[in-house]
Image (spheres, rainbow, N blue to C red):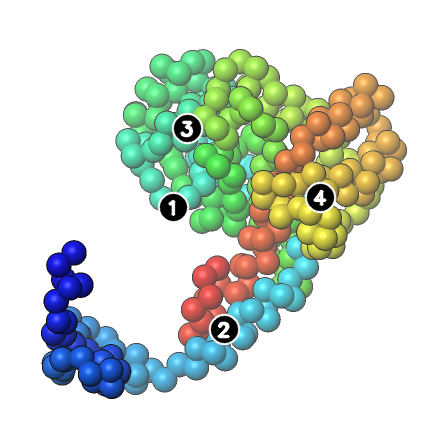
């Protein structure tokens, strides 16, 4: 603390404004004229190239944002991943996040992969699933490389039903699996029998009921639902109660007109109603479909 009891003698490096302010109050100060190095000739060459390009970033960003704002993400259907997702194969597992190999995957993601293989009938248990992966027969790819998105450590396999969301302004489509609910679920890495049973029910009951419902109902504009939900307190990530409620209102009349039994209709409505996060797996592909047209906008710094 003795520093504050002694006369200060200041050496100012860099901005001269600090030196001038100190001089005004009578401080003993000297100024050193110094600038940070560029980092070598390579950095200077890159900066020179950027200057030569003369890209109008502001205009490019305006173009990208205009595309994003003009998006109309619309739920147009639901189908099995193998039938609609570009490049999907029976031995391919799509995952959230960037490219990653089995040995670098987190515990939850490995668990989701194991569960996905058991769900597909490619393995009977954890041991068989790990052995199959380590044999090299199973391929992995990010969802984003196949026009889709995956929540948390969620994966998509060939037989899993996926929502089809089309940006009707530009004609591009994005995909996402259905939300299982909270707790012990595949996207958190769980793969016990009750998790697999729920996934099978989603494939055998929830999927066909919703598929017929959407055929009767027709396209559902998700941007309209998201806009309303935001005004009702949702942020369409960790809070989806309003959006899910609005979605139920949209589909309920058509769902009741489907050819399925009253028991199956009741099960579907109860499942969606009990899962506030059901709409999350619609807001995510809605965002993906909205951003896709802005990809590759020359000169834009907007991350898509």
Q: CB of mark 2 within 8 Å of CB of mark 4? A: no
Chain-order first, disc 3 or disc 1? 1
Q: Position of residue 170 (x, y in %)?
A: 63, 63
Give the residue displayed 62% in from the left and 51% down from the top.
Answer: 286
Q: Residues within 10 Å of mark 2 (few under 14, many from 20)?
A: some
Read off the residue under disc 1: 98
Mark nearer the N terminus (1 vs 4): 1
Numbered circle sitting on residue 61? 2
Q: Which mark is in front, 3 or 4?
A: 4
Q: Which of the numbered marks, if any, corresponds to residue 108?
A: 3
Task: Give me the C-alpha separation between circle 2 and circle 4.
Answer: 30 Å
Q: Nearer the viewer, mark 3 or mark 1?
A: 3
Query: Image height check: is 105 above or below 14?
Result: above
Q: Is residue 215 left or right of residue 77?
A: right
Mark-to-mark CA distance, 1 and 4: 28 Å
Q: Position of 249 compared to 241: left or right? A: right
Q: Secondary structure at mark 4?
A: helix
Circles 3 and 4 in contact, beta carbons < 8 Å? no
> Residue 28: percent from the left, percent from the top?
13, 80
Q: Which residue is mark 4?
A: 243
């Amino acid at each position: 603390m003795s520093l504050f009891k002694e006369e200060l003698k200041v050496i100012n490096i860099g901005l001269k404004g600090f030196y001038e302010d100190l001089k005004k109050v009578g401080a003993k100060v000297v100024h050193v004229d110094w600038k940070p190095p560029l980092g070598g000739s390579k950095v200077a060459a890159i900066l020179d190239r950027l200057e030569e390009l003369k890209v109008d970033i502001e205009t490019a960003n305006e173009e990208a944002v205009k595309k994003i704002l003009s998006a109309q993400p619309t739920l147009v259907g639901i189908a099995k991943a193998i039938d609609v997702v570009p490049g999907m194969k029976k031995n391919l597992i799509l995952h959230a996040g960037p490219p990653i190999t089995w040995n670098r995957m987190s515990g939850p993601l490995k668990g989701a992969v194991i569960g996905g293989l058991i769900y597909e009938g490619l393995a009977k248990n954890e041991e068989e699933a790990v052995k199959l992966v380590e044999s090299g027969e199973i391929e992995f790819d990010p969802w984003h490389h196949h026009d889709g998105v995956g929540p948390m450590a969620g994966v998509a396999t060939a037989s899993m039903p996926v929502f089809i969301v089309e940006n009707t302004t530009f004609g591009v489509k994005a995909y996402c699996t259905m939300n299982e609910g909270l707790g012990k679920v595949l996207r958190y890495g769980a793969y016990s029998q009750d998790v697999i049973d729920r996934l099978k029910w989603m494939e055998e009951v929830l999927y066909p009921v919703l598929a017929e419902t959407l055929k009767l109902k027709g396209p559902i504009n998700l941007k309209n639902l998201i806009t309303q939900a935001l005004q009702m307190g949702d942020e369409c990530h960790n809070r989806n109660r309003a959006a899910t409620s609005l979605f139920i209102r949209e589909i309920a009349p058509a769902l009741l007109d489907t050819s399925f039994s009253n028991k199956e209709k009741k099960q579907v409505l109860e499942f969606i109603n009990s899962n506030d996060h059901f709409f999350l797996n619609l807001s995510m592909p809605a965002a993906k479909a909205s951003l896709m047209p802005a990809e590759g906008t020359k000169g834009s710094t907007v991350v898509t």
